[in-house]
Image (tube, rainbow, N blue to C red):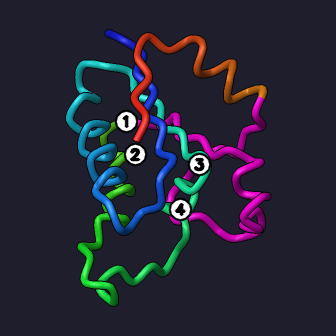
């Protein structure tokens, strides 16, 4: 079993990267230990009450709730990314742990594979 980090750093709508990251996390969780990291504009995936149908996009954000069902409990959010976007006080739509940059780097160094989306 490998330790796989999935870094989501792009915004949720306008491209398929977030959906692809989620698909890979769910598909590989049975044979790998998955950790998901939301950094940079990836933190926008965690905002509640998104309405992607307003811009004719598919609503895959709710599927992030499947992470728990697939035993993916290591879900982290970069504190500085939240602060720089003034989102630190906003409730997040999935359970996640806020970590600082130092902790983020430490967690990434123990991974066998790092995938960035």
Count neighbours of disc 1 (C-alpha within 10 A) and say few if under 14, some if 14 to 19, many if 20 or more. few
Can you tell which mark lies on residue 46? 4
Distance (Cα) linking label 3 and label 1: 13 Å
**SS for callout 2:** helix
The residue under the point 38% across, 68% down is: 13
Numbered disc in front, either 3 or 2: 3
Residue positioned most to the bottom = 54
Task: Report if the CB atoms under discs 1 and 2 are less than 8 Å apart.
Answer: yes
Is 84 within the magenta? yes
Distance (Cα) linking label 2 and label 4: 15 Å
Task: Report if the CB atoms under discs 2 and 4 are less than 8 Å apart.
Answer: no
Is 74 within the magenta? yes
**SS for callout 4:** helix
Quick one: 106 or 32, which is closer to the camera? 106
Q: Position of residue 7 (x, y in %)?
A: 48, 37
The residue under the point 32% across, 47% down is: 22
Looking at the image, tell me whether mark 2 or mark 4 is earlier in sequence order: 4
To which quarter of the image does residue 105 belong?
top right
Residue positioned most to the front = 14
Residue 62 visible here? no
Numbered disc in front, either 3 or 1: 3
Q: Is residue 102 above or below residue 79?
A: above
Residue carrying label 2: 68
Looking at the image, tell me whether mark 3 or mark 1 is earlier in sequence order: 1
Can you tell which mark lies on residue 71? 1
Residue carrying label 3: 96
């Amino acid at each position: 079993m490998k330790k796989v980090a999935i870094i989501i750093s792009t915004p949720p709508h306008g491209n398929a990267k977030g959906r692809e990251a989620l698909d890979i996390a769910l598909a590989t969780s049975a044979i790998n230990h998955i950790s998901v990291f939301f950094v940079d504009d990836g933190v926008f995936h965690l905002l509640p009450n998104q309405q992607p149908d307003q811009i004719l996009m598919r609503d895959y954000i709710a599927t992030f709730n499947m992470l728990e069902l697939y035993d993916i409990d290591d879900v982290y959010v970069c504190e500085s990314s939240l602060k720089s976007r003034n989102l630190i006080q906003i409730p997040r739509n999935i359970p996640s742990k806020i970590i600082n940059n130092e902790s983020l780097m430490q967690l990434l160094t123990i991974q066998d594979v790092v995938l960035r989306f």
